[in-house]
Amino acid sequence: MAAQAEPVGVATGTGGAAATDGAAPPGPRDAPGAANVVLGGVGKTFRRAGRRTVALAGVDLEVRAGELVCLLGPSGCGKSTLLRIVAGALAYDQGAVTVGGRPVSGPAPDRGILFQSPMLFSWLTTRKNVLFGLKAQRSRGIHERDDPELDAEADAILATVGLSQFGDAFPHELSGGMQHRAAFARAMVTRPSLLLMDEPFGALDAFTRLRMHEFLLSMWEQYRITIIFVTHDLEEAVLLGDRVAVMGGRPPGIREVIDVPLGRPRHALDVDTEQFLAVKRSIRQALTTDRGA
C-alpha cells in the first residue's frame, strides 16, 4: 500500500488561528499541566580509553512552565547531550537539574521525547503504536485505566493530530509527516508535562517540514506544555521558540539566550516579515561571535 497523502489539519496564513475542533486554545499563561525546567551549573565529561572530552560545562538555563525554548547551535555543541540529561537518559557530572521542582535522576513518565526518526514499531498499527506507552505505564502500575478508556484516549489524540482514518495503518503505509504526527500522538497521549524534541523534522523535505512546523505550533497552542526543541536551523528556531538558547564554544555550553519578541500564533508566512528577519540577524550575530571566540 502506498504512503498516504497527509491530511491538512492546521490553518495557515500570517496571524491566523490554528484549527482545533472549534475550541479556543489556552491563553499564553495557561499551562496547568506543564513543568518548569531548571539547570544550574550542569557539566558532562566523557571519559574513554584515557581520553577526556568535555561535552558540556557550566550550563545555566531556566525554562518556564508552558514555554517553548529552542536549543540552537552547530553539530557537536552539546545540544543533544543536554536534552538527554534533561530526559534522564544520561547522567551529568556537575550541577543540578530539576523538572517540575523534582531532581532528575533518570527517565520518568512525565517527560516525553521525540527524535529525528519517528521510531514507530513497524509491526504495530498506528493506534497500537499510540497505545504502547499507555499500556506500558499501566503494567508498571502508573495508572489503572482499562482498555476501553485507553482506546478512547487513543482515538481522541488520533483525531487531534488528523489521523483518525489511519488508526489501522502500519507505519510503512504513512507518509513521513504522518509518521511524525503518530509519534507526537504517542508522546502526548501519556500526558507529559515536558516534551523534549531532538531535531524531529531534520530529515524531512522542505514542504513536509513546513507543514510539521504548522502542526507543532497548533498543537502547542492547544496543549501548552513545556517544550525544549533542539535544532541547527536558525529560521526554525525563530519560528517556533519563545526564546532561543545559542550553544557553542569550548568547552561547549549556552553562550546566550535570546528572546523572540514575535506574537502568537505564528505561521510560515511570518518568516518574511521585518521583525522576524531582525531576530534572525541578532541570533546569527551571536552564532558568528561564538565561532570567532
Image (cartoon, rainbow, N blue to C red):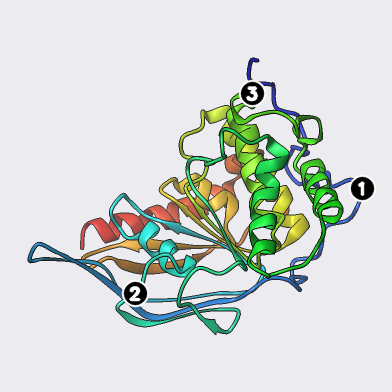
Task: Farthest residue to the front: give it.
Answer: 139
Note whether residue 266 is visible. Answer: no
| Depicted 53 relative to depicted 118: above or below | below
Residue pointed to by mark 3 = 173
Location of residue 31 by image quarter: bottom right
Q: Amino acid at mark 1?
A: Gly
Query: Alpha carbon of mark 3 to alpha carbon of mark 2: how far?
Result: 40 Å
Assign the N terminus to one quadrant of the image: top right
For marks 3 and 2 on the same chain, the one whose residue lies earlier in the sequence: 2
Q: Is residue 57 left or right of residue 89?
A: left
Q: Amino acid at mark 2?
A: Tyr
Q: Position of residue 284 (x, y in %)?
A: 39, 52
For marks 3 and 1 on the same chain, the one whose residue lies earlier in the sequence: 1
For marks 1 and 2 on the same chain, the one whose residue lies earlier in the sequence: 1
Q: Which disc number belongs to residue 216?
A: none
Badge 3 crowding class, 10 Å Cα cut-off, few under 14, some 14 to 19, many 20 or more, is: some
Q: Are marks 3 and 2 in contact (CB under 8 Å)?
A: no
